[in-house]
Image (cartoon, helix red, strand yellow):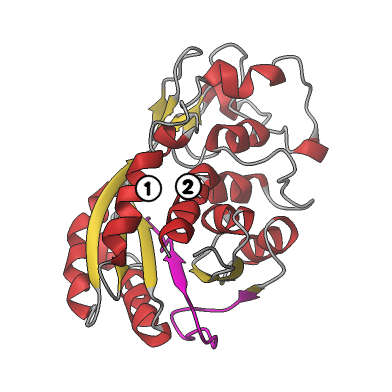
Amino acid sequence: MHQSLRVVDIFCGMGGFSLGFVQQGCEVYGYDWGKWQYLNYYVNVSKNVSRVNLLRTIPKIKNVDVLIAGPPCKPYSRLNITKKKYERHPLFPTLRRTFEIILALKPRVFVIENVLSAEKYLLKNTSLLDGYSWVLAQYSYYNFGACVNKKRLFLIGATDSFFDDVVRKLDSYAYKTKGKTLEEAIGKYLDYKWDRQINHIWRRSKRNTKFKFSFAVNVEWDKPIGTFGNIDKMYVHHPILKRPISVREALEIYGFPIDYRFIPLTPLREMYQMLADTVSPLFSNALAKAIKEVW
């Protein structure tokens, strides 16, 4: 049965997780505390977005069909090389809070996304899921048409065996759309000049060639890019041009539509960070389609 589902996206960020559901005609509500996340979601994804501290507040919304969540991955990410990891990180409580919000809102279906190294903590919190059945699956955005081979864990659960049908349907969509090479994704920007209007911008300073970054990502023109984080913190160098990958190019790599544009005044580092945290809308579109088809 096809219908407009009511979807709640907590820790929604720039809206990559939500966008696929919006494209599939769902009624989506986003919640995040970040100023730039809120503003860019409002402009590019949906006006149904609230700026709230989810560690203190549970969204007051009823009749939720689907809850999607991308709680911060920094406590678990291998790219986090600081001493503040796991329980020592201030964002560590957000994962457990995600499960508490699921129990409060009682959606029929929920999907939680996080990095592979968060598996132990995802599984630990499943003990809270009274009344839900669930499965832990791993997907790469590349298998859904993106140019990035970023693998992520997805905890998919439901109040009945419905989640099995969702996973089977989602698996059937994987590989149907071939992922892009870097040339296919961003080759059209080779002759483009710096253009803030379309977010074709990058850090223009000596830092690009002399700064010692914590991580360097090797990219090849005829292959998809591997997983990467905040380009302003690590070095993701364009394989042909002597500069980092631009914000516009990163949007294309993840599969965002050309009309998705960060609003003026959004700091460059914030743009890159939101991209590092996002779910590919190509994946979320396939997920939304799978849920709607078996609803």
Q: Nearer the viewer, residue 256 or 40?
A: 256
Q: Which mark is residue 170?
A: 1
Q: Which mark is residue 6?
A: none
Residue 259 at x, y percent in the picture:
75, 43
Classify residue 197 as left or right of residue 209: right
Residue 273 at x, y percent in the picture:
54, 48
Residue 271 at x, y percent in the picture:
62, 47
- What residue do we see at 58% from left, 34% from top? 250
Q: Does the magenta portion include 52? A: yes
> How many neighbours does mark 2 have within 10 angstroms: few (below 14), some (14-19), or many (20 or more)?
many
Main structural element of the magenta stretch: helix, strand or loop? Answer: loop
Rendered view: 120 above or below 273: below
Residue 252 at x, y percent in the picture:
61, 33
Given the image, on which type of amino acid does mark 1 rest?
Leu
> How many neighbours does mark 1 have within 10 angstroms: few (below 14), some (14-19), or many (20 or more)?
some
- What residue do we see at 72% from left, 38% from top? 258
Residues shaded magenta:
50-74
